[in-house]
Amino acid sequence: MKRNIAVATLTTAVLVGGGLVATAAFADSDSGGKDDRTAAADRAAGDTGAAGRVGVDGAVAAALKAVPGTVTEAERDEDDDDRARAVWELDVYGSDRVWHDVTVDASSGKVLSDREDDGGDRDRHAPRSSAVSLDAAVKAALGAQAGTVTSVDLDDDGDDDDRGERAPHWDVDVTGKDGKQHELRVDAKSGKVTVDRDDNDGDDD
């Protein structure tokens, strides 16, 4: 059973004006000038540099360099069928107004493939602007649950809230330092974090 427990609220200012600007600003943060808190968040997200692991921020930066636009989903795949290596798989809505599937090597950060969406999902719409950017959602989730981000996904077709209105949110999966999985939901408007699912109790026999 899913539990919706409020665990944190994003109190820092967030970027407003569309996912493209917010996400691009997140990607550019790798270029330098990070403060201690940002560097710590990068390490928690899996950007360990010399250890050969590219975190979600590095994967987004690589994808946006190949396909300028807005990243709405990034997922780490440890068991890629085509390659004997871990990869990041990202959905990018390009500035060309076309959806792209981008694959990034999780060790080197190299873009392995960039494929335009084949049109199989013809109802797929352009991402709606979000007050909370992808990077802000990741940092909010890590503020609530320390660990490594393995997946982040914008759901802007979200469930209706108590007033019957759309509730867009980011789904963020975090592997805790104890190896357990945590699924967090970050409100795309307020930055409020709730626990969507927590595997701390493990599986009962």
Image: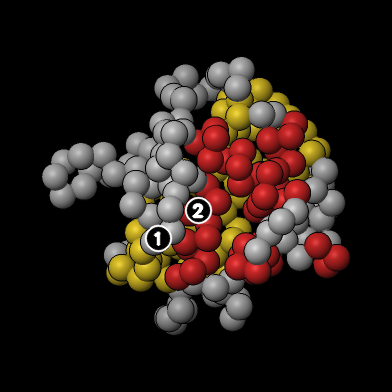
Nearer to me, 39 or 72: 39
| Disc 1/disc 2 C-alpha distance (Å) | 8 Å
Q: What residue is drawn where x is 39% and y is 61%? A: 11
Judged left or right of residue 92, residue 186 is left
Q: Position of residue 140 (x, y in %)?
A: 47, 61
Q: Position of residue 161 (x, y in %)?
A: 21, 47
Q: Identify the residue position indicated by label 2 in the image.
A: 136
Q: Position of residue 144 (x, y in %)?
A: 45, 70
Tell me the quarter of the picture where residue 69 sits: top right
Nearer to me, 185 or 113: 185
User: Please, what is the three-letter code of the amino acid marked with disc 1?
Assistant: Leu
Task: Check the image and report above or below for 170 versus 6.
Answer: above
Mark 1 and mark 2 lie on one chain; the one further toward the N terminus is: 1
User: Please, what is the three-letter code of the amino acid marked with disc 2?
Assistant: Ala
Q: Position of residue 143 (x, y in %)?
A: 49, 69
Task: Check the image and report above or below for 157 versus 139.
Answer: above
Q: Is residue 75 visible?
A: yes
Q: Is residue 193 visible?
A: no
Identify the element where label 1 is drawn: loop
Q: What residue is drawn where x is 76% and y is 65%? A: 48
> Are there few (<14), some (14-19), or many (20+) residues within 10 Å of tag 1?
many
Task: Check the image and report above or below for 82 versus 4.
Answer: above
Q: Quadrant of the C terminus?
A: bottom left
Q: Identify the residue position indicated by label 1 in the image.
A: 10
Identify the element where label 2 is drawn: helix
Q: What residue is drawn where x is 77% and y is 61%? A: 53
> Are there few (<14), some (14-19), or many (20+) residues within 10 Å of tag 2?
many
